[in-house]
Amino acid sequence: MLRLKINSLRAIALSAILLIPAMVFFGCSGQNSKEQRNPYGLELINTYDEYYRSVQLDSNNLMIDLEKYIPDVVLDIRYAGTNNFTGKQIYTAPKAFLRRPAADSLLKIQQILAQEGLGLKIYDAYRPYAGTLYFYEVYPDTTFVAAPWKGSIHNRGVAVDLTLINLATGEELQMPTPFDEFSDRASHSFMDADSTVLANRAKLLKIMTENGFTMYEHEWWHFNLRNRAGYSLMDISFEELEGKNRK
Ligand SMILES: [Zn+2]
């Protein structure tokens, strides 16, 4: 009896483990029910048609492909591979999209940086809401991972994770931690580092905050668009954003 119980518990646990990644890998292509994809009942845009209507109402809602829009920008979309804190591939493609005003600000920042031989490397931009659900399952600490009952600013297409690079070599400027190191060292108030490293972090902070973004105290790489009110949470895939696989 007891063994039976343990076995059935094991089966439930196993199916939960198998179900969670499935929600992410297939969550954006409409194979899961709306309840599974939106368990907190948030107001979400989750069809291409709804997204398209929102762009017709306000062109600032347009999600822009940063790779096409910003000359020489480098993408290192960590969640499109396994080199991230989950150890799993979350995204179907290494793409970075942001709403039009955020993309415009980054374009300007890249142009300013280019004058001194520097550029931007993007780790993450718009993140479908399914990703936020999964991240919290893996790492349930809302200092570093957005609360799925609220959604992330990444889900609204107005947050970006990035660093500075040498434009000629592509080499990253040294920062206090690697991307997504969930520790006190990732905070802007962490000062126990080499002066060059602190100067690099300060340079990124200055150029971002002077050009339309606000910082997030706990993560040197994360910035939010300052004027970010009114952008909906979204749970549509990169492919759908590009108008492919329209439902
Ligand atoms: Zn972020």
Image (cartoon, rainbow, N blue to C red):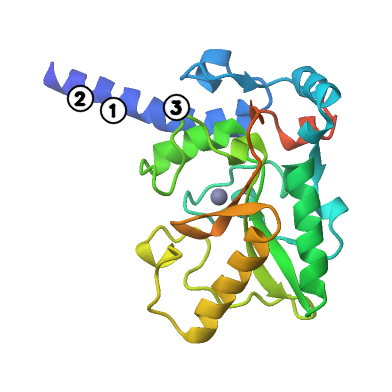
The tag earlier along the polypeptide, 3 or 1, is 1
Q: Secondary structure at mark 2?
A: helix
Which element type, helix, strand or loop, lies under badge 1? Answer: helix
Q: Specify few, some or many for label 3: CA neighbours under 10 Å numbering under 14, 14-19, or 20 or more.
A: few
Q: Which residue is mark 3?
A: 149
- As helix, strand or loop, the secondary structure at mark 3 comes to loop
- Visible residue check, residue 83: no
Q: Disc 3 and disc 1: Cα gap in Å? A: 27 Å
Quarter occupied by residue 61: top right
Is 15 or 89 nearer to us in this picture?
A: 89
Residue drawn at (69%, 41%), measured in percent from left and top?
Answer: 92
Residue at 47% in and 48% down: 86
How far is mark 3 from mark 2, CA to CA? 31 Å
Residue 154 lies in quadrant: top right
Identify residue type, mark 2.
Answer: Ile
- Residue tagged by mark 1? 10
In the rendered image, which residue does mark 2 sit on? 6
Task: Check if mark 2's residue and mark 1's residue have beta carbons within 8 Å.
Answer: yes
Amino acid type of disc 3?
Trp
Q: Position of residue 136 (x, y in %)?
A: 43, 38
Residue 10 seen in the figure:
yes
Crowding at label 1, few (<14), some or many (≥20) Cα neighbours within 10 Å?
few
Which-is-in-front pick, marks 3 and 2? 3
Q: CA distance from mark 2 to mark 1?
A: 6 Å
